[in-house]
Amino acid sequence: MTFYIVCLLLFLTSCSTTTLIHAFQHASFVFTAIRPSAEKRIAPARRVVTTRTPPAAQQEIRCRSCRCILDKFPPLYSTSTDTTVPNGSNSSNDDDKNKNRDDDDDDHSRNKVSSSAFDTQSLDFTMGYLNKHHREVLTKFAIAFTPLGVLQAKKNAFSGGSFTIQDATVVDIWYPKGPPQQGDVSCSSSYLELEVTVNIRGAKDPIQTEIQRVSLDAEPNIETRGFVNLPPIAAAPSMMATEDSSTSTNTIVTNSYNPIDDFIRRLNRLCLIVQSPSTTGKLIQLGFQIGGSKRSLLKEDLYLNQVPHNRYVRQYFYDMASQATLNAVIACSNGQISNRMKITSLFPEMNPSMDSYRIGTLLELARSIAITLAEQNLRVRVCVQGSMGVGIFTGTPKQLSGAATLLQRMDWQSGPGEENEGMVGDYINFGGVGKEHVVNAGMNGDDLEKSVFQDDVFLLLCPQSMVGVDASIMGALMEMVGAAGDRPVILINPDLSDKASSQGQQNIRGRKERMEFANSFQTIHHFQNIYVSGTSYFPILGAVFKAGHNDPWVAYQRRDLQNNEGEIYVPILSTEEQPDGEMILNTFE
């Protein structure tokens, strides 16, 4: 027996590969000829086919379909996939099953698209834009928010470069049409699905890819350094007030929130976490193109360097501030925001530090806001602070000089037969700053049969302190806010900072309490131009804008069109908190 085995080994080593293949084929043919009935007794064979879907085909399928169809294909980092294809009559049954499965997947895909904030066209456009222009940011997302980033940090702790995330592309985006629930940070709520490419040093197949999901409310991995976490975006209110442009009247209607705006805000938060602030402005422009509300889009051809401004430019700022105020008052009545609010509108005619300051523009803004609120059956008291100081050092700030008298003498269209007949004196009243100017419901002392209606909203024009003794507005303002209770108190262009004073009245004593009180007022509307320096107001470089209480802060850069055909404001930065000057200038192009 040993002799035959040795001879067989010598024969195999001396023969070529082709000779061996022919020998085995001949042996198989002889065996079949001798035993013709053996095949009948053997169970039907199952042919095993090894397939691997090309990466290009998988990329195309991911861009056009949903996650459930992706599950039918092998992950790109696997070496092979064994798919069993039976012979005989079972193949037709399997074909029917696969067809039914494909039909179910198509139905699920259609249901997903119908419940998504994106339609097919906007989804393809968004993914194509992100993959073409922001792959570096997507790679940072993979490092900061996926388990691959943790794995990279651990593997590179002892040997740098052993595991590297090289690239990432978006293959799917999911964001629901309805507003997400407060605190819901699950992947099923809203996410980006990334195809991440990694390089593993020393592996048999060093370039591998894997599918990872990034929640739009994700927090950065603790193991990955260099990323600072930011608070999650608050759940957007389901309703807000807007003016019905389809009618000639100032009818206020409600509409649902825009999911595209909310998606862009959450995506911008991730960009700020991975330290890519310049990307946020481009994503704001993306939101304008794919169906965003454009509430943060500034009008073209404002020409704010031309003073006095055109009437339509002033009216544009009046309308924005009035609508933002009305939305904030409605939100306050629903308990969504605090009753302490402030409006900052500092275009050139409203900026008291510039020689273009016009007090008439300030009064017109106050009139527009007051009338907008009064048209909703709200009683508004417009307040201007009185004289402050001691002895001969008594007076009012120069910005408000004569404002109280002019406010009552200006044309309110409230006379008999006019548009706002009877509004002044009933729905709109005037007063100063202090608790004695807060009117509550009750009976008139002189005429007991005449009832007195309480003020619903308090509108304060430019409250500010003065230089000198007993010239701080903070005491009277605190008392007035306390007496107003939960009714909205809205400050227009306030300056609640301390001024120089003797005996440390505005510099040392109670400074912490005054700062906390000043910071308790929430910004519901903001517009301020950006200049080269604090003493030069030409040319205008851009603007910082916040459309409403629930809108982000957006910094714009002013750009002139070719051949003096106009000017536009291009968004360059978007944040949830007011950006500082250094951050804005770093994003300027």
Image: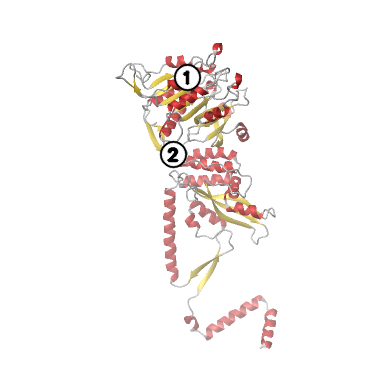
- Mark nearer the viewer, 1 or 2: 1
* Relative to 284, residue 309 above or below: above
Q: Amino acid at mark 1?
A: Val
User: What residue appears at the point 52 percent right and 71 percent down from the top-left corner?
Assistant: 47
* Relative to 43, residue 554 above or below: above
The single residue placed furthest to the top in the displayed view is 392
* Relative to 186, residue 495 above or below: above
Q: Locate the N terminus and report the quarter of the image it occupies.
A: bottom right
Q: Which mark, residue 237? A: 2
Q: CA distance from mark 1 to mark 2?
A: 33 Å
Picture coordinates of residue 455, whole percent (x, y): 39, 24
- Does residue 566 appear in the picture of this structure? no
Picture coordinates of residue 285, whole percent (x, y): 53, 38
Query: Residue 154's image quarter?
Result: bottom right
- Does residue 186 appear in the picture of this structure? yes
Mark 1 = which residue?
384
Front-lying residue, 137 or 457: 457
Query: Residue 326's image quarter?
Result: top left
